[in-house]
Amino acid sequence: MNKMFKFTSFLSSGVYMLGWAILLGSSLTLFTNSSHDLLFSYSVVFGQDESGSINNTDLIGQLIGQGKHMNNIGNYVKALTYFDKVLSTEPNNTEALHGKGLTIDNFGNHTEAIKIYDKILNIDADNMDALTSKGVILFNSGNHTEATRIFEKVLTLNYSTSNRSLFDKGVSHYGLGNHQYAIDYFKKALVADPNNSLTLNNLGFALDISGNPEEAIRYFDRAILINPNNANAFYGKALAVDQLGNQTKAITLLDKALSINHNNTFALTGKADYLYKLRNFTGALMYADKALEIDPVNTNALIVKGFSLGISGNHTEAIKYFDLALENDPKNVDVLYGKRVILNELDNRTRY
């Protein structure tokens, strides 16, 4: 999945930019089957009883639709109010729970988002949306082993041809490394909802990792037109222009993403990786630490920090962070490689 650390010793400086994530957080959107549902205002709450609870099924659907719309245009605070309004009356409404989970994930609270997805899965063990969203958090935090299990399950489930189901299948194929299948599913989802910024983002990532950064940039630019504050689209575009060899522009785009959302862990870790590549290890550690403050189990940030500490000579601390990363994903080859390099260096020092 990731273009990661490919070098022969800690004396090397050649680090590739951390690669393509699956974006269900930070640039959140949900799928809607019709834009007409979005015309209803949240202030028109005709279906309430005296207690303020909602007793109108159609109105609940309208509120969820509004929450989805707010997510798509980047108004995440307002989106949360819509989902919470539904949940105040129907606490087990899985669609509203999923929307809230995605919105909370946007704010960087991945642990709380997983709790919400687990609640959905306790209600419906085969809920594709909750499975996919949980898999994405695990995948993006570096726990590819568990994410793989979830994505494989998603692909066994029956599904409709709705844009959301097509998207879930695309995400699962992406996480399993089947990038062309992912591209196909994302494009099918866009046929149903051509202005869905989340699909546009993920299609951009799938195209970029498949070696087509020019086309990827076109989809990231479309996502930015829909939501100019789409931090993940700027992050994805940074990866694509880096593929084209324009590192200066890539850093500018990462900084743009962070100016929109300073808690964007993708951009923070990407900036840390770039600074490592420039041998600015102090800066790399600073940005890795910022990412870990938001997401303490972010394996990619733990890896950047481990390598930065290792090349700076702080081997004991480096091993500590590699071990933390291995708790998330015991089979992560980048972590295992980094730890092995340090242990070899420590062994050589003991011998001589």
Image: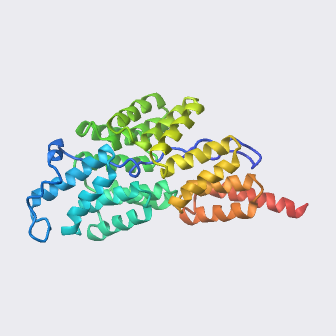
Q: Is residue 5 above or below residue 81?
A: above
Q: Nearer the viewer, residue 144 or 282?
A: 282
Image x and y of residue 318, in percent:
70, 60
Residue at image position (69%, 50%) is: 282
Quadrant of the image occupied by residue 49: bottom left
Image x and y of residue 12, in percent:
74, 44
Instruction: Judge whether residue 259 can be spotted in this image.
Output: yes
Image x and y of residue 87, in percent:
23, 66
For the C terminus, the image quarter is: bottom right
- Along the horizontal axis of the image, is 265 left or right of 76? right
Image x and y of residue 132, in percent:
36, 56
Which residue is the extreme one toward the right? 352
- Along the horizontal axis of the image, is 61 left or right of 230? left
Q: Nearer the viewer, residue 253 or 157?
A: 253
Residue at image position (19%, 45%) is: 33
- The colour scheme used here is rainbow
Instruction: Judge whether residue 128 can be spotted in this image.
Output: no
- Along the horizontal axis of the image, is 87 left or right of 291? left
Quadrant of the image occupied by residue 310: bottom right
Q: Nearer the viewer, residue 312 or 261?
A: 261
Q: Nearer the viewer, residue 60 or 137?
A: 60
Q: Is residue 301 above or below residue 241?
A: below
The image shows a total of numbered marks equal to: 0
Residue at image position (37%, 59%) is: 104
